[in-house]
Amino acid sequence: MSRPATRVLALLEILQDRGLVPADELARRLAVDARAVRRYVTALRDMDIPVESVRGRYGGYRLAHGVRLPPLMLSDDEAVAVAAALVTGRHEPVGEPGPADRVLVKLNRVLPAALRRRVTALVSSTSATTGPLTPDPHLVLTLAAAVHARHTVRIEHTRGAREVDPYGLVVHGRRWYLVGHDHLRDAVRMYRLDRIGAAAELPARFTPPEGFDPTDHVMRTMTLGAWTHRTEVWMDTDLETARDRLPAPFGDLYPCPEGGVLLVSGAEDLKAMARVLTGLPWSFTVRNPPALVTALTEHVASLAQAVARSQS
């Protein structure tokens, strides 16, 4: 058990299964020192789980009388779904338990014993390289309430204060985005929540455009509108195969009357785009921009040099 949250879960389970447990036994079973045990006890207390300290020769730690809760009525697949979402979605600094870790501890506290052990095993054996960055709770709740009530909000953005009609919140690529109509620019814009310092709900109401999809707006902006270069590449494949191979954020796919598929996308780094294209399993033709052809030529030349060096 390497994660602090896993050890907190293990500590809670030991205390629930037994009465008074000596501190040195807890340290031994958790494979930590006495100072770490005190930190994990403090973490449980911060979550309103009353852990009592008993001093003296036969002292140790125990849960206060009557703190056990009835089992939470979740099926195995429901419990696994909640735990998996928390494990893969958390992105906390290494060291102390973060918000997602605290929820995991509370979840395990009310699960039946057999299921609790299985969920603990899932938590201790699962890692995620990426997950959405946790937004400021007050900020995200304020914005969500405004979206639901269809109230205009005033946001303090890094580029200045502005009023926005919030159409929705979208999580994409580990980041949270607010999508809405910017009164100052008189256009639909998206704003990263980590660049919004504060938000206030205003009394003014709005009506969102019929059929507007905030997620679709973010995806299209990320693939086309946010990039310096617009690229068009014809690929010798069918639409279904291309959709299976290429992720949606990579670009828009259109069937061509003459056969094949046209990929319309955006790129900030044409050299990186060239590297991606050479990894495709189909023949392709770059239609635009000419600079992408140049980047592709340079990349192919570097590959040829690597082959020559490898054969020498």
Image (spheres, rainbow, N blue to C red):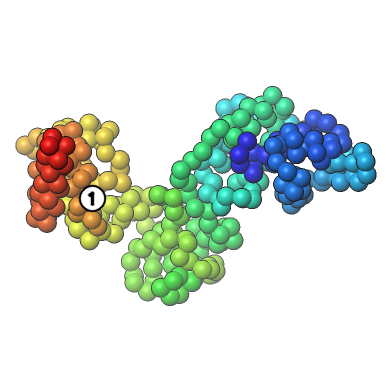
Tell me: residue 20, above or below residue 137: above
Residue placed at 63% from the left, 27% from the top? 118
Q: Is residue 245 left or right of residue 63?
A: left
Residue linked to disc 1 = 272
Residue placed at 8% from the left, 38% from the top? 257
Q: Is residue 284 visible?
A: no
| Residue 164 percent across, percent down from the top left | 43, 67
Q: Quadrant of the N terminus?
A: top right
Closer to us: 132 or 78: 132
Look at the numbered disc 1 and give the secondary structure of its residue.
Answer: helix
Residue placed at 39% from the left, 68% from the top? 182
| Residue 292 percent across, percent down from the top left | 13, 53
Closer to us: 154 or 212: 154
Q: Is residue 84 left or right of residue 210?
A: right
Location of residue 203 (image quadrant):
bottom right
Q: Is residue 191 visible?
A: yes
Residue at the top extreme, as displayed: 114
Closer to us: 290 or 38: 38
